[in-house]
């Protein structure tokens, strides 16, 4: 491995921020194994440039790399049949696993979004970035972030089961 920066700084950064970055990768891919692969790929790309990146805001750089790498993987991947289970027609009045069901429903709905909308939702609502920060990360105008956000939230409202929408705010449910 070529030395692109201080190894101990890089290791400390990954140790401190790795779980958060893995969460972003999982939200983008919807698959734990792909998320690990995505994060590992991005960290391998970032390591040679670490000396230059570490002085600035490495989170923004790495998030952008995650989004772009995932998008390039997504464009190349075959998207034929996707396995899915049958959802129940009704919900019990009390369900001990309701929060898990909601989390799974939300994750499936986010995975169903187009790549650009998914990236906007992950960055805006899970990473809690501003419109401007999201636009800078994605390399687009703030208006694009707003329109993609609006379309994504509309789609999520349509995709989520009725019981998942009863609480109202999708952002509060997601966090």
Image (cartoon, helix red, strand yellow):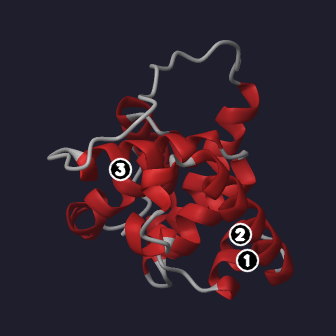
Quick check: 13 above or below 130?
above
Task: Identify the residue under disc 2.
Answer: 149
Q: Position of residue 133 (x, y in %)?
A: 63, 83
Q: How many marks?
A: 3
Q: Which residue is mark 3?
A: 103
Question: Counting residues from the N terminus, which is met first, the one under dot 3 or under dot 2?
Answer: 3
- Within 10 Å of disc 3 (Cα), the crowding (few <14, some 14-19, many 20+) is some
The answer to the question of whether label 1 and label 3 lie on touching residues, with beta carbons closer than 8 A, is: no
Residue 47 in view, yes or no: no
Give the percent coordinates (x, y) of residue 107. 45, 46
Q: Do we see residue 64 in this rendering?
A: yes
Q: Nearer the viewer, residue 140 or 81?
A: 81
- Determine the residue positioned at 46% across, 20% down: 86
Q: Is residue 140 above or below residue 163?
A: below
Q: Between disc 1 and disc 3, whose residue precedes?
A: 3
Give the residue displayed 76% in from the left and 74% down from the top: 145
Q: Residue at x 20, y 46 (%)?
A: 95
Q: Please tell me whether mark 1 or mark 2 is closer to you in this view.
A: 2
Q: CA distance from mark 3 to mark 2?
A: 20 Å
- Rate crowding at label 1 as few (under 14), some (14 to 19) or many (20 or more) other CA atoms within 10 Å: many
Q: Is residue 97 left or right of residue 71?
A: left
Which of these two is toward me, 20 or 124? 124
| 122 vs 171, nearest the viewer | 171
Q: Give the mark toward the camera: 3 or 2.
A: 3
Question: Which numbered disc covers residue 135?
Answer: 1
Describe the element under mark 1 as helix, strand or loop. helix
């Amino acid at each position: 491995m070529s030395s692109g920066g201080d190894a101990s700084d890089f290791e400390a950064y990954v140790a401190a921020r790795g779980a958060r970055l893995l969460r972003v990768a999982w939200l983008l891919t919807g698959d734990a194994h792909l998320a690990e692969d995505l994060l590992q790929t991005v960290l391998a790309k970032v390591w040679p440039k670490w000396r230059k990146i570490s002085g600035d805001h490495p989170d923004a750089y790495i998030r952008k790399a995650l989004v772009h790498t995932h998008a390039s993987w997504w464009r190349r991947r075959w998207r034929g049949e996707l396995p899915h289970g049958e959802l129940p027609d009704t919900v019990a009045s009390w369900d001990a696993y309701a929060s898990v069901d909601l989390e799974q429903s939300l994750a499936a709905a986010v995975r169903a979004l187009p790549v650009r909308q998914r990236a906007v939702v992950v960055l805006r609502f899970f990473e809690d970035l501003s419109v401007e920060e999201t636009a800078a990360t994605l390399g687009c105008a703030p208006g694009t972030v707003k329109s993609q956000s609006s379309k994504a939230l509309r789609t999520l409202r349509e995709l989520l089961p009725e019981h998942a929408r009863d609480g109202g705010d999708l952002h509060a449910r997601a966090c």
